[in-house]
Image (cartoon, helix red, strand yellow):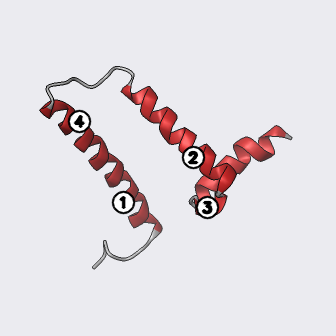
Amino acid sequence: MVWGRYSSLNYQILLYLSSRVVAGLGKRILQKQGRETHPKLYSILAALVWGTVMVLFEESPDVLHPSLKHSMDEIYRFGLE
């Protein structure tokens, strides 16, 4: 089974699909409640995600994907020199 095996491509597809599923479920919940999406929802979500990345980067960088850790190193560690 192709999708059950780990590869970098399968991992990227899984991450993409996971984010789309979560976004769709959130939208569905709001629609069932008769609400529209809040105009600032993207800003709030972006702040939560980046805040989480920054906390993980500072406290447990080994749990981040190597490419994300490398990017964070470039931006926040080596970029300050």
- The secondary element bearing badge 4 is classed as helix
Q: Based on the displayed image, in which of its 4 quarters is residue 12 positioned?
A: bottom left
**Viewer-side residue, 55 vs 77:** 55
User: Nearer the N terminus, badge 1 or badge 2?
Assistant: 1
Residue 52 in sight in this render: yes
Q: Tell me the tag on residue 53.
A: 2
Q: Is there CB contact under 8 Å for labels 1 and 2?
A: no
Q: Nearer the viewer, mark 1 or mark 2?
A: 2
- The secondary element bearing badge 3 is classed as helix
In the image, what residue occupies the spot 61% across and 61% down? 66
Residue 61 in the image: above or below residue 5: above
Q: Answer few, some or many: residues within 10 Å of disc 4's Cα (few below 14, many 20 plus, some between 14 and 19).
A: some
From mark 3 to mark 2, how far is it between C-alphas?
Answer: 13 Å
From mark 1 to mark 3, how far is it between C-alphas?
Answer: 17 Å
In the image, what residue occupies the spot 77% across and 46% down? 77
User: Nearer the N terminus, badge 4 or badge 2?
Assistant: 4
From mark 1 to mark 2, how far is it between C-alphas?
Answer: 19 Å
Q: Position of residue 70 (x, y in %)?
A: 67, 54
Q: Is there CB contact under 8 Å for labels 3 and 2?
A: no
In the image, what residue occupies the spot 27% across and 49% down? 21
Q: Answer few, some or many: residues within 10 Å of disc 1's Cα (few below 14, many 20 plus, some between 14 and 19).
A: few
- Can you name the residue that lies furthest to the top here? 39
From mark 4 to mark 2, how far is it between C-alphas?
Answer: 24 Å
In the image, what residue occupies the spot 39% across and 22% down? 40
Q: Position of residue 47 (x, y in %)?
A: 51, 33
Residue on which the image places disc 3: 66
Q: Tell me the tag on residue 27.
A: 4
Instruction: Name the amino acid, label 1.
Output: Leu
Q: Is residue 67 left or right of residue 2?
A: right
User: Nearer the N terminus, badge 1 or badge 4?
Assistant: 1
Residue on which the image places disc 1: 14
Instruction: Name the amino acid, label 2.
Output: Val
